[in-house]
Image: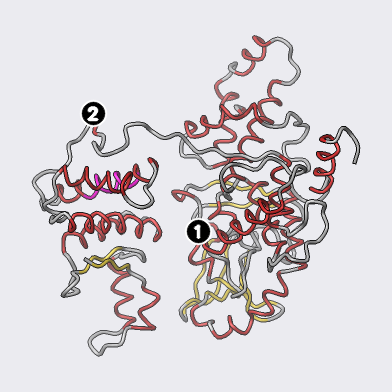
Amino acid sequence: MDLAFVQSGLLEKYLDTDVISAADVVALLERRGVLDGTPVYLDEESQMPVPPLCEYGRYLSTALLDPSTLKEYGRVISRLDGHLVALGSDVLSATETDLVSFRGHRTQRQKKPVGGSVWSRESFVLADFYGFLVDRKILPNRPMRVAARGRNALAPRARAGMDIRHLTFDQYRYFRDVGLGGQLPDAQVDRTFRGWSPLRGRAGSDIALGSGMRWREWATVLLPEIGMWPGMPSGGAEFLLQACAKYGKARSIYVSEDAVASADLFCVLERPDIVSRAARTLERKARDLFVVGEVDVAGGRVKGVLDGVVREYEMSAMDAKLRRITVFEGEFGLEALTLFVCRGGLMPGADAWKSYRHRAWGRMTALADRATPLLPARRWRWHDLRHTYALRLLTYLENLMDGEEPDLKARRRRHRSYLTGHIRHNPLLIVSRRLGHASPATTYEYLQYTDDLINEFESAFSGWVGDGEATYAEIASHALSGASGGHR
């Protein structure tokens, strides 16, 4: 069985038939609510749709999942089908033994077994798939038993905790300045550095750390949202985040003044060269882009032309796909409205940011010596900056609330005096709201790490972002001086 995905944007380029036009097919998909990314299962020989599986893909589409999630769910069922075919079975006649075999293949026997968190998601998809088949009367019952409390019997028994990995101040500056920024540990310019835009990586890390946003959230930020638009005041930026947030849960984002200044440095020194080189390319692609003509900063809206039609959107309601193709008429011609741009002139995608991170890790490990901070055992992730933000802010707020009150019992009485005060001022709930967690229970996972951070909390992020404080070179020199008994 072959797996394909709905991608309406390719129809105009490749659909060539006298029976129905590409525009009619696109209109039909929109009218039926078939989203991009919806999985379509085709018979290998006839290339005709496989009805029960395609019905499940249609069912997933109605759940309004984002394209990446739809594709991943589709791949799970495709992998299951491939394994069952090798066993002489298929998804409709599979037994619990077949599914147990698939679990063993994925978690133990394949070349690179998946971990518990990945299998937990896949087992959820399997349970959902067979639940759908039973609900639609395609199967009389599920092939796997339902465990206690309605739990999927194939799911891992032990619930994996969050993989919280945070950075110390020294580690962060080393990651940012040496790994991404192309410096040597002594702050000298590394003339062998092959990175094309080091200030972009430094700005991305500063915004990620200074705001606590997830990768998809900060990497898709627009220039007006971060305050880099004519007529907007300088300083920190605050905007509403929703469409690019996890689960579409709206929350207010604040980006510190130092982080905005780091992004401004990228916009002044590197961004103009990138957009000027890509302007002619974007002009040729104008038909496929959302060309903005009006930006209402106060109302948080943009208005422009997309597919030949004048459209208006709230910036908070623009998803990552739309943001990627949003441009405006700038100094050099068309340029992306997103803050971060790559060689093609548009927003870098997931693979691009992954490559920036991997190259940075390679530099950090290659240049590591006794003056550099202890590097993590595993390669760092962009998400580690979000964890660091949460731990720094949580620890700072806890110390701020405790103050210098010597009486522990008095502090506890003050914390629980009023329910409204507890909800408004409780550090854990504040951090939970800032991070956009669906439940404070997720934020509880951070508590076991709050004692590991630096105990200097006059200001939660003073000196972390921007260049107002010590450079990494000074930090490294201090570390080296301490290691050698005070002599350099």
Q: Is residue 60 left or right of residue 304?
A: left
Percent coordinates x, y for residue 452 in the rendering: 65, 29
Viewer-proximal residue, 77 or 49? Answer: 77
- Residue picked out by circle 1: 317
The part of the image, by quadrant, that contains residue 47 is bottom left
Viewer-proximal residue, 211 or 80? Answer: 80
- Alpha carbon distance from label 1 to label 2: 40 Å
Q: Is residue 420 left or right of residue 403?
A: left
Colour option used: secondary structure
> How many badges with numbers are in the image?
2
- Residue picked out by circle 2: 148
Residue 11 magenta-drawn?
no
Viewer-proximal residue, 183 or 22? Answer: 183
Percent coordinates x, y for residue 100 in the rendering: 22, 42
- Magenta-drawn segment: 121-129
Circle 2 sits in a helix, a strand or a loop, which is it? helix
Callout 2: 10 Å neighbours few (<14), some, many (20+)? few
Q: Residue at x 30, y 58 (%)?
A: 74
Task: Say whether disc 1 or disc 2 marks the residue closer to the N-terminus.
Answer: 2
Q: Residue farthest to the left?
A: 140
